[in-house]
Amino acid sequence: MTRTTAEPGTRTVDESARTPEQHATARRSARRSRDRRHKLVFHLVTGALVVVVLYPAVWMLVSSFRPSAQIIGNVSIVPTEVTLDNFVAAFNGIGGVSFWTFFMNSTILAVGSVVGIALSSAVSAYALARIDFRGRRVWFGLMIATLLLPVHVIIIPQYIVFNNLGLVNTYWPLLIGKFLATEAFFVFLMVQFMRNLPRELDEAARIDGAGHLRIFGSIMLPLMKPALVTSSIFAFIWSWNDFLGPLLYLKDPNLYSLPIALRLYVDQTTGAANFGPQMATAVLALVPVLIFFIIFQRYIVEGVATQGLKG
């Protein structure tokens, strides 16, 4: 019995009369229609997530151009009045300290963290990944175990040590650990990257008379550039945004970083906040992080792309 299909306003089509090419064309058309629906749903969901994620940043940027009285309780994202007074007040600073003092303090901490983490983690990773010594696996396991240790457990013992050494109210408690490879996450990242590099490179260098120092400096470091840049990006962002460390160890306002400066805009006695300059300072503090990430983000992609390569 012949099967037919009919649609409103169209003639009945005899399916048995279709050629194979017509069937293939119909299937491709149905597949394209289904793919378009899936893409539409995907883009709608992605767009909704982007709006949710970016809304706080957009609100902060818009609020930095509003008068302080119009920031809280204003449900409109479009400002009814635009002013630059917030940025003028932000550049003038707070508590007798200028914005540029806070900015330079954050820069010192962030750059010092990047240099310390990049150097110490790379050297430690080379030792754990390329040098065969007794207890290497044990030391590597202990290092990984520190990732499971909550930071709040060691805050008080560390503070007591640095206070007895007279290093409180200096940058040493915030930087010395970075130069001693205490950041296990970055060491682990570089170890895993270095394990993907062929050992034939080391063997060829040893045949030519190179030692560990020459192999590390001339062979490993150039090949580790993606891992180094990735670690530097994370180290810069984490140090730039760090609030708890400077809050614990810094007492002099002239040593405060930008996150602590943002806290100064909240009145300690009444709890009231000067939201306009605070929003402007937050926007200014976000700019270096965005610039740093935009410049070096391609190295993150390069590092991910090379993780699956092994010679």
Image: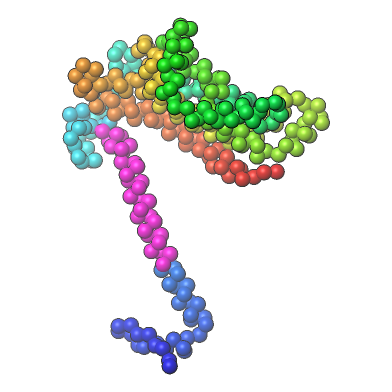
Q: Nearer the viewer, residue 264 or 212?
A: 212
- Which image quadrant for residue 65? top left
Quadrant placement of the C terminus: top right
Q: Is residue 156 above or below residue 218?
A: above
Q: Give the residue at x 71% y 23%.
A: 213
Horizontal arrangement in the rendering, residue 187 relative to residue 105 (left or right): right
Horizontal arrangement in the rendering, residue 264 relative to residue 240 (left or right): left
Q: Give the residue at x 37% y 18%.
A: 247
Report the magenta stretch's main SS: helix
Residue 1 in sight here: yes
The count of marks equals: 0
Horizontal arrangement in the rendering, residue 7 relative to residue 81 (left or right): right
Q: Give the residue at x 44% y 86%.
A: 15
Q: Specify whether residue 44 is painted magenta.
A: yes
Q: Give the residue at x 43% y 64%.
A: 35
Q: Position of residue 173 (x, y in %)?
A: 47, 15
Q: Where is residue 89 in the image (x, y as percent from the top left)?
A: 27, 21
Q: Position of residue 285 (x, y in %)?
A: 37, 27
Range covered by the magenta-colored residues: 34-63
Residue 92 in sight here: no
